[in-house]
């Protein structure tokens, strides 16, 4: 009994460190999205490029992430969680250091692309670590917790980075992330298995099955709408006579509500017989949030706040629930490979969303056309969640 009591503080410390590594393995790769959203006007002014070109920074990062995600699951199976996390945190440190030193727009393109390496590895590596180190009954809660790290990035980018940038400059704001990444890279050494049994000894390529394909299609649509919304919400808000400081706070609100939704809704989804119906409800709410946002004007800023909160409470949770589905249900395939495919779909949406919205905003109809297209894509995603639910039901009946 005394041995157990003496080991308890160490076990709690290791568990806390494990959760911190999982959270920041999701936070730091996604920070580039929110940091370019909130600090983009400062970058464009200092480096003399069109603010609309910010979408191409997101495209370079998530485009590479999408490409690498096709093999990321197999790579993580081959090299193990420890090595994957070391590469992840190393890539973040290098990327943010290069961004802080950038002198021209094309340097930013190259630096942000490096973040794509970390983004591709994040979900397969953290999901594998959870499968190895967390008891089955706790996995859904831990998945929700680590996925909330993405929204922690939004909160940090909305509250902390602008304050640092206004006081010390945007280069310092980006540069301080590099040592943070190095610290968590070192922390990963203490919470990952020293030995790794290769789950994929030959880096074989496995095609997604029907269930996984439907989930990928849903995540692509959500990722496209979500990335465009987050990237251009501050710009749209300033066009409605909102100050830049307040517009950045919209991202912070988005981050807070997103963290809450992922932590609460992921375990809730795991208690359902089929999470597809929860995905349907959340995506429908996200579509309504965009409709509300597009109706905002100089006299109705409350619609911007409500839209940001609505997207955080709904669309943000869908990716965490999707990842929980992969860990919980083997019908989607090997967890690392399935995670990499869903990440590929989600990141592809993220890569195309901002450039597409920027292009649509330049057409007759302006931002209203862009918001309308995003709403239509989310409505299509609702239809696809119903197809996913039907496919899961047929599979369950066939195996019964």
Image (tube, helix red, strand yellow):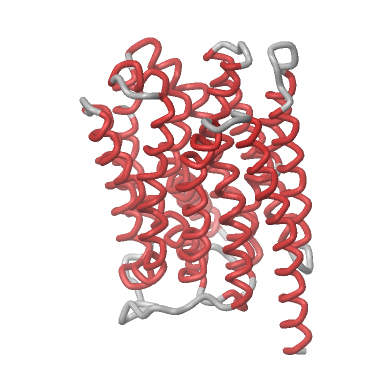
Residue at position x 25%, y 35% in the image: 106
Residue 309 percent coordinates (x, y): 69, 32
Residue 33 percent coordinates (x, y): 45, 37
Q: Quadrant of residue 68?
A: bottom left
Q: Is residue 35 above or below residue 208?
A: above
Q: Is residue 140 above or below residue 155?
A: below
Residue at position x 35%, y 53% in the image: 64
Q: Is residue 342 above or below residue 212?
A: above
The C terminus lies in which quarter of the figure?
A: bottom right
- Number of callouts in the render? 0
Residue 66 percent coordinates (x, y): 42, 57
Residue 163 percent coordinates (x, y): 45, 15
Residue most extreme to the front: 364
Residue at position x 34%, y 68% in the image: 75
Q: From the viewer's side, name the closer residue of 51 and 346.
A: 51
Q: Is residue 352 left or right of residue 189?
A: right
Residue at position x 35%, y 21% in the image: 44
Q: Is residue 327 left or right of residue 292?
A: left
The N terminus lies in which quarter of the figure?
A: bottom right
Q: From the viewer's side, name the closer residue of 269 and 114.
A: 114
Q: Can the viewer see residue 372 in this picture? A: yes
Q: Can the viewer see residue 139 in this picture? A: no
């Amino acid at each position: 009994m005394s041995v157990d009591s003496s080991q308890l503080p160490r076990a709690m410390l290791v568990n806390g460190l494990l959760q911190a590594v999982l959270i920041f393995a999701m936070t730091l790769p996604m920070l580039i999205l929110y940091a370019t959203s909130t600090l983009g006007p400062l970058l464009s002014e200092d480096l003399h490029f069109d603010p609309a070109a910010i979408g191409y920074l997101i495209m370079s990062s998530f485009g590479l992430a999408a490409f690498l995600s096709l093999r990321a699951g197999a790579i993580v199976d081959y090299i193990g969680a420890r090595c994957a996390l070391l590469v992840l945190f190393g890539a973040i440190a290098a990327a943010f250091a290069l961004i802080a030193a950038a002198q021209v727009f094309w340097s930013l393109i190259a630096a942000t692309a490096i973040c794509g390496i970390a983004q591709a590895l994040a979900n397969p590596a953290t999901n594998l670590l959870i499968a190895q180190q967390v008891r089955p009954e706790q996995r859904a809660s831990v998945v929700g917790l680590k996925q909330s790290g993405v929204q922690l990035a939004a909160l940090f980018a909305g509250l902390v980075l602008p304050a640092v940038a206004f006081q010390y400059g945007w280069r310092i704001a980006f540069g301080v992330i590099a040592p943070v990444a190095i610290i968590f890279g070192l922390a990963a050494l203490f919470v990952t298995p020293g030995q790794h049994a290769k789950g994929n000894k030959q880096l074989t390529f496995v095609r997604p099955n029907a269930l996984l394909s439907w989930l990928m299609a849903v995540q692509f649509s959500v990722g496209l709408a979500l990335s465009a919304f987050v990237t251009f919400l501050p710009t749209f808000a300033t066009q409605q006579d909102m100050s830049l400081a307040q517009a950045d706070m919209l991202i912070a609100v988005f981050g807070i509500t997103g963290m809450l939704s992922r932590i609460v809704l992921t375990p809730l989804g795991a208690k359902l017989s089929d999470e597809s119906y929860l995905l349907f409800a959340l995506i429908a709410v996200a579509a309504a949030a965009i409709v509300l946002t597009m109706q905002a004007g100089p006299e109705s800023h409350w619609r911007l706040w409500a839209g940001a909160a609505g997207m955080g409470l709904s669309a943000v949770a869908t990716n965490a629930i999707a990842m929980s589905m992969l860990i919980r249900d083997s019908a989607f395939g090997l967890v690392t490979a399935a995670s990499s495919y869903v990440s590929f779909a989600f990141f592809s949406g993220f890569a195309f969303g901002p450039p597409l919205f920027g292009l649509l905003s330049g057409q007759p109809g302006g931002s209203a056309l862009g918001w309308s297209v995003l709403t239509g894509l989310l409505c299509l995603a609702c239809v696809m969640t119903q197809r996913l639910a039907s496919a899961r039901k047929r599979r369950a009946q066939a195996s019964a």
